[in-house]
């Protein structure tokens, strides 16, 4: 991705560099793919619970379609990864029985 000058998908401000200076979202919001999900996101998500887990749960319960469409559209700064959320909920339900 070209990091010279783009528009932030999260707050729509102009980005100069690798991160938005207004909201902090990465300029590189890669396309969602299974290979990247397995190689990078699973390992990172299992060991880091830092990106708005409670906010994401609240949004999923109150506005599920809006939250999912925001995440798919690249507005990922305030959301925890939905795939990990499903994985964590699945583990909790599996081990609670």
Image (cartoon, grey):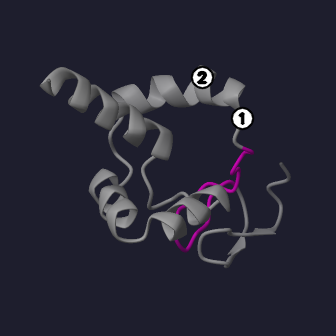
Q: Residue at x 72, y 45 (%)?
A: 30
Q: Residue at x 40, y 39 (%)?
A: 86
Secondary structure at badge 2 equals helix
Q: Where, by quadrant of the figure, is residue 87 drawn? A: top left
Q: Judge left or right: residue 51 versus residue 93.
A: right
Are the residues tagged 2 and 1 within 8 Å (C-beta)?
no
Placement of the C terminus among the 4 image quadrants: top left
Main SS type for the magenta part? loop
Q: Residue 43: image x %, image y %?
A: 47, 22
Q: Residue at x 37, y 66 (%)?
A: 59
Q: Which residue is mark 2?
A: 38
Labelled disc at residue 49: none
**Spatial separation of the CA atoms under disc 2 and disc 1:** 9 Å
Dot 1 crowding, Cα within 10 Å, few <14, some 14–19, many 20+: few
Q: Is residue 90 magenta?
A: no
Compared to residue 41, the image places residue 22 above or below, namely: below
Q: Is residue 5 visible?
A: yes
Dot 2 crowding, Cα within 10 Å, few <14, some 14–19, many 20+: few
Q: Which residue is mark 1?
A: 33
Q: Residue at x 68, y 69 (%)?
A: 8
Compared to residue 51, the image places residue 96 above or below, namely: above
Which numbered disc flags the more N-terminal residue, 2 or 1? Answer: 1
Query: What stretch of residues is rendered in magenta?
Result: 18-31
């Amino acid at each position: 991705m070209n990091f010279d000058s783009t528009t932030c998908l999260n707050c729509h401000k102009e980005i100069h560099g690798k991160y938005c200076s207004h909201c902090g979202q990465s300029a590189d919001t890669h396309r969602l793919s299974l290979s990247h999900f397995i190689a990078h996101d699973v390992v990172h998500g299992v060991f880091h619970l830092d990106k708005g887990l409670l906010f994401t749960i609240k949004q999923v319960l109150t506005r599920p379609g809006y939250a999912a469409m925001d995440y798919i559209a690249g507005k990922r700064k305030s959301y925890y990864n939905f795939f990990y959320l499903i994985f964590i909920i699945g583990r909790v339900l599996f081990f609670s029985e």
